[in-house]
Amino acid sequence: MPRLFIDRDTWSHALDAALRDAGIPFEAHRDHFAMDAPDPVWIRAVGAAGWLALTRDQRIRHRPNEIAAVRAARLHLFVLSSGNLGAADTGAIAVAAWPAIQRAAASREPPAVWSVSRSAQVRLLKV
């Protein structure tokens, strides 16, 4: 089963608890990187580890250096499409979307950027 990496902008105690309660294996940014680590640093490391990444940062796919890092790292990046979600909502969406996230990652070779909607729908984005 793949591991889900939660970036610094997405992690919360509520999300942590929701993922643990659901038995979803995950890694938190704070356990591996400094809080001010540039996105390309964690992107490269997460890709090298073979983890899937979940973020609220919808701008990653529009920043040339960050999307280049996603491509170079061969990362599956899942972006919450509603960036202003509360912690409990983020947890509920992540848990509900987990089966679709796994299917999406298994359906396509990385790199790929995916949108995760409020209704837990996962769809491939063009980058």
Image (cartoon, helix red, strand yellow):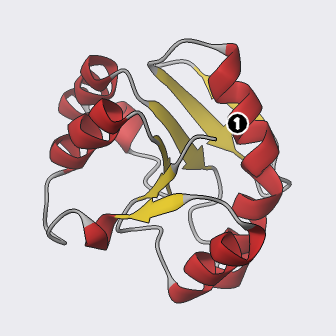
Q: Residue at x 19, y 40 (%)?
A: 40
Q: Quarter-wise, where is residue 67 in the image?
A: top left
Q: Position of residue 3 (x, y in %)?
A: 53, 48
Q: Position of residue 95 (x, y in %)?
A: 76, 62
Q: Residue at x 28, y 73 (%)?
A: 30
Q: Position of residue 123 (x, y in %)?
A: 72, 30
Q: Which residue is mark 1?
A: 102
The front one of 13 and 69 is: 13
The front one of 16 and 122 is: 16
Left or right of 84: which side holds 118? right
Q: Residue furthest bottom?
A: 13
Q: Residue furthest top?
A: 109
Q: Residue at x 47, y 67 (%)?
A: 10
* Disc 1 crowd, CA 10 A, few/some/many (<14, 14-19, 20+): some
Amino acid type of the residue that numbered disc 1 sits on in the rendered structure: Gln
Q: Position of residue 62 (x, y in %)?
A: 36, 33
Q: Residue at x 64, y 41 (%)?
A: 1
SS at circle 1: helix
